[in-house]
Image: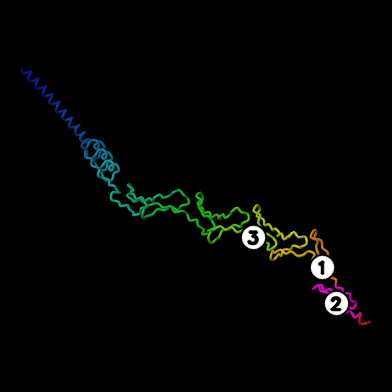
Amino acid sequence: MLLLAVLIVLLNLSDYIQSTEATLQTGRHGDDYGQKHRGNGNGDNDKKHGGKHGKGDDDDKKHGGKHGKGDDDDKKHGGNGGKNPCKNANCDDYDLCTDDSCDKHSGECVYTARECDDYNACTLDSCNPNTGECTYTPADCDDYNPCTEDRCDEYSAQCINEEKSCDDYNLCTDDWCSPCSGDCKHDEKDCDDYNGCTEDSCDPSSGDCIYTVIDCDDYDLCTDDICDADSGICSHTESCRSDNLCVLSSCDPEDGSCSAIYQNCDDYDDCTDDTCNPETGDCEFTDNGYCDSK
């Protein structure tokens, strides 16, 4: 019995020694582990396992520890280190023609001009700062000449001022544009040859002037038909008429031939010389002195 009791005491002592040794080993391991898991914020594992974190460590930020100030990752994960630089920024420039914003990285205001380009080279594009609406003003190509048609070439953006066409497609008119009113004028072509004995006209097929002699023919063979160039009046004189009134002329109406009979002024008196005055056609009798000598 005594031996059994001693054996039991030895076994219990052995268990105690082993337990104590295990406790000591556990304590040592606990210290090492504690260092790892109750760290002071300097080590990476400390951060991973919920220890008290140091300032500014990257992994600290990932796992919700007490974050350092100003770190980029801190801002992403809700730490208290970083601030939004645009939070209190007022970037309104009170210009409706700009889009106002704040650069979230620099905190600086950015003013972007509104795009008003209508891609038409013939308009002047602008923005109304009071309304913010785009305005498109056509290019001013007016050369202040009413006789030109003014326009803008949308390809070259150049003004084109073309002479106004007043052509009425009538070759017998002179077409022109009035510089005062811009109205087209169509004046008949001047074909006057200042000859009253011609009828002046214009050939519409060629635009040439035509001068037609006035027909004064009275169809009387015994008249000379004449036109006065100044007045354009026709006159008809006897074709066989003589300026010598002492000649009695006549005309054959069948063929227009003339015949003449001279005035007979013979008084059958030997004492006179008998003559006819050609201007008056009167007979004149002049004493010739023949009878005085007898």
Label 2 belongs to which residue?
285
Which image quarter: residue 293?
Answer: bottom right
Mark 2 is on which residue type?
Phe
Label 1 belongs to which residue?
248
Marks 3 and 1, how far apart at CA:
49 Å
Q: Assess disc 1: are there few (<14), some (14-19) or many (≥20) residues with their C-alpha within 10 Å of its C-alpha.
A: some
Badge number at residue 280: none
Q: Position of residue 107 (x, y in %)?
A: 32, 49
Q: Nearer the viewer, mark 2 or mark 3?
A: 2
Comparing 230 with 263, the one in front is 263
Badge number at residue 190: 3
Circle 1 — which element? strand
Circle 3 — which element? loop
Dot 3 or dot 1: first in sequence order is 3
Read off the magenta span.
265-290
Q: Assess disc 3: are there few (<14), some (14-19) or many (≥20) residues with their C-alpha within 10 Å of its C-alpha.
A: few
Looking at the image, the residue that sits furthest to the right is 294
Which image quarter: residue 79?
Answer: top left
Say which residue appears at 91% left-offset and 80% top-offset: 291
Comparing 152 with 195, the one in front is 195
Comparing 114 with 265, the one in front is 265
For the residues labelled 3 and 1, say whether their Cβ atoms are less than 8 Å apart.
no
Mark 3 is on which residue type?
Asp
Query: What kind of colouring is applied to the model shown?
Result: rainbow
- State whether residue 62 is above or below residue 160: above
- State whether residue 89 is above or below residue 242: above
Dot 2 or dot 3: first in sequence order is 3
For the residues labelled 2 and 3, say whether their Cβ atoms are less than 8 Å apart.
no
Marks 2 and 3, how far apart at CA:
63 Å
Mark 1 is on which residue type?
Leu
Say which residue appears at 91% left-offset and 82% top-offset: 292
